[in-house]
Image (spheres, helix red, strand yellow):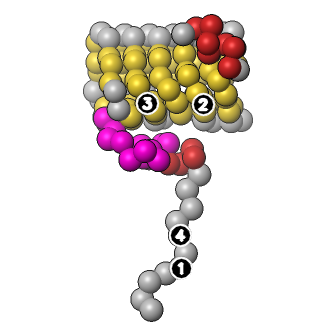
Amino acid sequence: MFGSNTKEKTSPASSTLNGTDKEGSATTVIAKGTVIEGKFACNENVRLDGAIHGEVKVDKRFVMGDTSYVQGNIHARDAAIKGKIKGDLYIKEALHLMDSAVIEGNITAKTMIVEEGARYNGSCKIGEQAVVAKS
């Protein structure tokens, strides 16, 4: 009677940017203005709005907001990128380059979505064989 029969619709990209995951996993948030120097590793989802200068290893989903920056290689299961990266990406499953993504490095992923406006400068290897070869 008082409830609504409508459900909120979220696209995979919007749920990714909000840091939610269908597995219900925890999300580590690195806020704007935070700078991490050195290797960064996390076994949960990560939302980055700050900067990391060093290698990044995320066991689950890695999300970069508009203000984020990584100088170093990134290894993750899935990734949604809106920020800037100077390094190589190794994504085991899906990579989503949003409209403001800027990548200076090589990309290896099982699948990739590139929105209009996203830019990358480097080689790009997509598919099951590419991921297996880099493992």
For the N terminus, which image quadrant? Answer: bottom left
- Mark 3 or 2, nearer chain start: 3
Q: Earlier in the sequence, mark 1 or mark 2?
A: 1
Q: Quadrant of residue 106?
A: top right
Front residue of 102/1: it is: 1
Q: Is residue 47 left or right of residue 89?
A: left
| In the foreground, 128 or 44 | 128
Q: Amino acid at mark 2?
A: Ala
Is residue 18 inside the magenta stretch? yes
Q: Residue at x 55, y 75 (%)?
A: 6
Inter-mark Cα distance, 3 to 4: 26 Å
Q: Which residue is mark 2?
A: 94
Residue 7 circle label = 4
The Cα–Cα distance between marks 1 and 4, rounded to whole angstroms, is 7 Å
Q: Which residue appears at 39% of the width and 11% of the height?
A: 55
Query: Mark 3 and 2 residues: CB-CB less than 8 Å, in contact?
Result: no
Highlighted range, magenta: 16-29
> Can you give x and y, in whole percent of width and height, for residue 92 in the image?
56, 22
Residue 28 on image: x %, y %? 31, 35
